[in-house]
């Protein structure tokens, strides 16, 4: 933990400092899945008695438990390890063009459950909310008996207006100005938070994935809904003035390209698409999970159709990523979905072409990585959206575990 964070831990107002300290400690427990008291003391610069008091408060709130001592310590008495409580959970929802995926994630990033409800067609926003609410209602007995549910996080393939959680535009779903936050809150009774799906993927990869502890990360995800992006800079998600930052899928790559739904011509997501890759290996839109293995096999074997479509898409992807590298100078670019499949079969070509177009220094500094979590990434990202509100002020969100409650629709204890 750097000097700036340590400086933030100190101040004149005791209550403000205490809340900030609780936030930082719970954040570390969540990100690491467990941390010893000794390591907390070392990272924060706080003394042992202060750490003990803060941990005791987090235990009383029901957010953490203390496990056995850390046997890896080579000096002094072993320190107990603080781990997330297993019953603190977030519900997640990810509407897609052909399905709605509902998840349950524990504090610490453990995916407990993930249910994909295939629809086979586009849904209205109201239908997606109703399906989600029905699945959540079916989980209610388990949730009430075994968990403390903090809220619902929605990962939406959409432009999300940050001020009120309205989906301003979800082009592949056909949704415009849908108040999905309000609809979901009314249908379930839980606090609800929503953000762009690719932005949440970027958060998941930066918190516990390929870009963990990285300060400058770009995440791009390719799926049936197109290409979405998220930008982590200075260790934080870039949202822009109204929450729309990171739309890298609409970078111009081909002046003679196809019309895009956004109104422009030759956007990245019109030239680099999942469907041609699936067709080249004989798969349909319902089989994206098989793309990675088949694409590797056919490309390595020199299948002419596969080589042609991969090389075509790599050329435009490299052009877009060169622009990204020049603008953001990232440490790492993480590719998910079918973009991860392209990276797996043609990383050398992608890197070479990107560096040919990018400025030399930032081009040499950046590295590529495949997304860590596969089909769980948006579930984890949506959960981070919920847990970030808990971590920001644990004591304001939760009552002590003995006073069983869940936050109300405004995110405060009922």
Image (cartoon, rainbow, N blue to C red):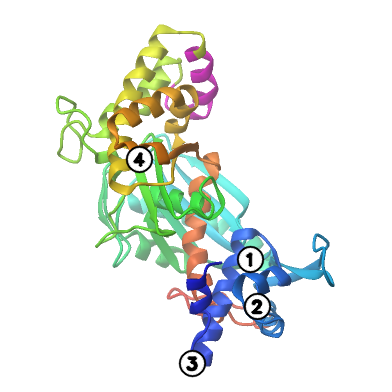
Q: Who's the residue at 54% across and 57% down the image?
A: 136
Which label is found at residue 12? 3
**In this rendering, which labeled residue sits more in front, label 3 or label 1?**
3
**Mark 2 crowdedness (10 Å alpha carbons): few <14, some 14-19, many ≥20:** many
Q: Earlier in the sequence, mark 1 or mark 4?
A: 1
Q: Which residue is identified by label 2?
A: 58
Find out whether residue 256 is within the magenta segment: no
> Tag 4, which secondary structure?
helix
Left or right of 311? Residue 134 is right
**In this rendering, which labeled residue sits more in front, label 2 or label 4?**
4
- As measured in the structure, the alpha-carbon distance from the residue carrying label 1 to the one carrying label 2 is 11 Å
Q: Which residue is identified by label 4?
A: 361
Q: Which corner quadrant of the image does residue 82 belong to?
A: bottom right
Q: Main secondary structure of the magenta part?
A: helix
Q: Are marks 1 and 2 in contact (CB under 8 Å)?
A: yes
Q: Earlier in the sequence, mark 2 or mark 4?
A: 2
The image position of residue 358, as x and y in percent, is 30, 35
> Tag 1, which secondary structure?
helix
**Mark 1 crowdedness (10 Å alpha carbons): few <14, some 14-19, many ≥20:** many
- As measured in the structure, the alpha-carbon distance from the residue carrying label 2 to the one carrying label 3 is 22 Å
> Tag 3, which secondary structure?
loop
**In this rendering, which labeled residue sits more in front, label 1 or label 2?**
1
- As measured in the structure, the alpha-carbon distance from the residue carrying label 2 to the one carrying label 4 is 45 Å
Q: How many marks?
A: 4
The image position of residue 1, as x and y in percent, is 56, 67
Above or below, 52 against 93 in this view is: below
- As measured in the structure, the alpha-carbon distance from the residue carrying label 3 to the one carrying label 1 is 26 Å
Q: Which residue is identified by label 1?
A: 29
Which of the pair 406/378 is nearer the observer?
A: 378
Which of the pair 194/137 is nearer the observer?
A: 194
Q: Are marks 3 and 1 in contact (CB under 8 Å)?
A: no
Residue range in magenta is 284-299
């Amino acid at each position: 933990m750097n000097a700036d964070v340590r400086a933030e831990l100190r101040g004149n107002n005791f209550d403000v400092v205490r809340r900030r300290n609780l936030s930082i400690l719970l954040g570390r427990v969540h990100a690491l899945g467990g941390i010893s008291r000794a390591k907390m003391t070392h990272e924060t610069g706080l003394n042992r008695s202060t750490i003990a008091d803060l941990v005791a408060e987090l235990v009383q709130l029901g957010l953490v438990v203390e496990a056995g001592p850390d046997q890896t310590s080579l000096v002094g008495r072993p320190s107990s390890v603080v781990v997330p409580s297993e019953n603190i959970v977030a519900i997640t929802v990810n509407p897609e063009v052909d399905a709605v995926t509902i998840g349950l994630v524990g504090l610490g990033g453990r995916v407990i459950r993930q249910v994909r409800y295939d629809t086979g067609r586009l849904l209205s926003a109201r239908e997606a909310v109703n399906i989600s609410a029905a699945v959540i209602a079916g989980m209610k007995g388990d949730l009430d008996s075994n968990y403390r549910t903090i809220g619902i996080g929605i990962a939406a393939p959409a432009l999300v207006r940050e001020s009120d959680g309205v989906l301003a535009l979800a082009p592949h779903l056909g949704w415009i100005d849908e108040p999905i936050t309000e609809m979901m809150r009314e249908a379930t009774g839980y606090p609800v938070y929503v953000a762009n799906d690719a932005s949440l993927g970027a958060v998941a990869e930066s918190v516990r994935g390929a870009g963990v502890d990285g300060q400058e990360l770009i995440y791009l995800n390719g799926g049936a809904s197109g290409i979405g992006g998220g930008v982590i800079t200075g260790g934080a998600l870039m949202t822009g003035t109204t929450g729309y930052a990171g739309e890298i899928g609409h970078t111009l790559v081909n002046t003679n390209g196809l019309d895009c739904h956004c109104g422009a011509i030759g956007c990245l997501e019109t030239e680099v698409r999942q469907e041609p890759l699936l067709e080249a290996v004989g798969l349909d839109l319902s089989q994206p999970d098989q793309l990675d293995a088949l694409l590797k096999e056919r490309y390595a074997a020199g299948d002419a159709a596969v080589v042609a479509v991969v090389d075509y898409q790599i050329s435009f992807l490299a052009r877009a990523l060169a622009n990204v590298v020049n603008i953001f100078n990232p440490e790492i670019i993480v590719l998910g979905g079918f973009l991860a499949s392209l990276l797996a079969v043609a990383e050398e070509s992608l890197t070479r072409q990107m560096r040919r177009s990018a400025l030399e220094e930032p081009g040499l500094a950046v590295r590529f990585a495949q997304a860590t979590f596969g089909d769980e990434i948006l579930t984890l990202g949506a959960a981070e959206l919920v847990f970030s509100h808990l971590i920001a002020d644990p004591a304001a969100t939760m009552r002590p575990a003995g006073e069983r409650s869940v936050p109300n629709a405004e995110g405060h204890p009922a």
